[in-house]
Amino acid sequence: MTGYERLMRAKRFDMKRKPFRQLHILRPVTWAISYPNIWARKLKVNRVGMEGIKPPFLLLCTHHAFIDFMVTTAAIFPYRANYVVAIDGFIGREWLLRLVGGICKRKFTSDLQLVRQIREVLQKNGDVLALYPEARYTHVGTTALLPDSLGKMAKLAKVPVVMLNMHGNYLNSPAWNLRKRGVPLSADYSLLFTAEELAQTPVSEVNKKIRAAFEYDEYRHQKEQGITIAQSWRAEGLHKPLYQCAHCKSEYTMSSSGSTISCSACGKVWQMDELGQLSALQRASDETELITEFSHIPDWYEFQRTEVRKQIEAGSYHLEVEVQVDALPNARGYIRLGSATLKHSMDGFVLEAAFDGNSFILVKPALSMDSCHIEWEYKKKGDCIDLSTLDDTYYIYPQTKKCSVTKIALATEELYFYHKRSALDPS
């Protein structure tokens, strides 16, 4: 049976099944898994305004690394929760994740079923609903895009809204290099709204307060707290989020090794110190003096966003690459479909192929996605993006080094805002 035939015959993940209340017998298991890890990282939880707050409540969490779930478990102790989890988290363990409260979600899709399940957890079961609305690990330790729908969903829940802003999780194992660094963890656990306050607050103000509560910068936190990361390999993988040279602006020419990141086009080299700051180590071929363009890693990342925005505003943004595609219709595992062409342009995404002679096309207009999910060196297969429908998720691996999934992610966000502004002001 070909990959395409397997996909057509595959039973889709049952997204409509009601969420399980976490079984009492499994709660000690979640504690046993979580506490040794967070004790090793010396977790400190700063509680603000949480006196007397008991379930049900909506818990909004920042998203840095896998250990986030363990920190969340410790923060809400002794209460149980349901967690919204991406479908790839269910692979090979669907039964267990459902029993401990997992609710499946395909990333960056509009899913009304999820709203129903959230209401089931909060209003019928009376438990905690833990949501990670950034929907991906932070790329460079700063807040990802939060959807406008978040405030509306919070008001529909009609329960208190609580915030868990975690620190150190990203620094301990950033998504571009998951090796553990032994960084201490902390978290701010605070009440944002009581149910009564929520009912009286306009959606726009709810969103404004939530976005303020979500603000974080892990490299600023590292510097302010004096957290040293002395591993000699601390910068390895940093070229994944920093794909464009800050000096000569060449794309896809960056590489990293040990504690340095460098550009093969101009020869410039920067070093990452033990406090996470960058400094120029070697001049570029056209430089007469050593200048550090960006000492703060998030500033370099935002420079790249500005460059992408320029292309979009000029109407010149376009990407067309050959890719390999895996499908994930359910939690049984990936199905290799084969080669395809991915186009990302001013109109959005088009994935087109003839899998085993069968015509296939997936179109995702720019306004249908305010962001997209990417992975670096995913499952040792390479960098990828994933695009989802309500029934399938496609993991898409570019087959050229002249492409960056980071740029695709930035462009997805900027295209969304560009078209949103155009829709509001057609002139």
Image (tube, grey):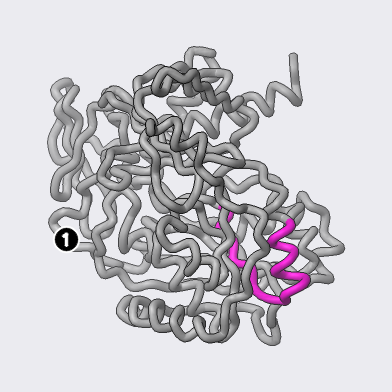
Three-letter code for the amino acid on which mark 1 is drawn: Gln
Rendered location of residue 329, percent (x, y): 50, 43
Q: How many marks?
A: 1
Q: Quadrant of the N terminus?
A: top left
Residue at horizontal 49 percent and vertical 29 percent from the top:
411
Secondary structure of residue under mark 1: loop
When asked about the image quadrant of residue 44, the answer is bottom left
Residue 130 forms part of the magenta stretch: yes
Span highlighted in magenta in the image = 116-133
When asked about the image quadrant of residue 186, the answer is bottom left
Depth order, front residue of 311/154: 154
Where 70 falls versus 351 (above or below)? below
Rendered location of residue 381, percent (x, y): 27, 40
Q: Is residue 98 left or right of residue 148?
A: left
Residue 153 forms part of the magenta stretch: no
Observer able to see residue 66: yes
Residue at horizontal 47 percent and vertical 42 percent from the top:
373
Q: Is residue 219 left or right of residue 247?
A: right
Residue at the right extreme of this rendering = 200
Where 3 falls versus 32 (above or below)? above
Rendered location of residue 278, percent (x, y): 26, 46
Rendered location of residue 197, percent (x, y): 81, 68
Depth order, front residue of 91/253: 91
Q: Report which residue position mark 1 lands on.
A: 231
Residue at horizontal 44 percent and vertical 30 percent from the top:
4
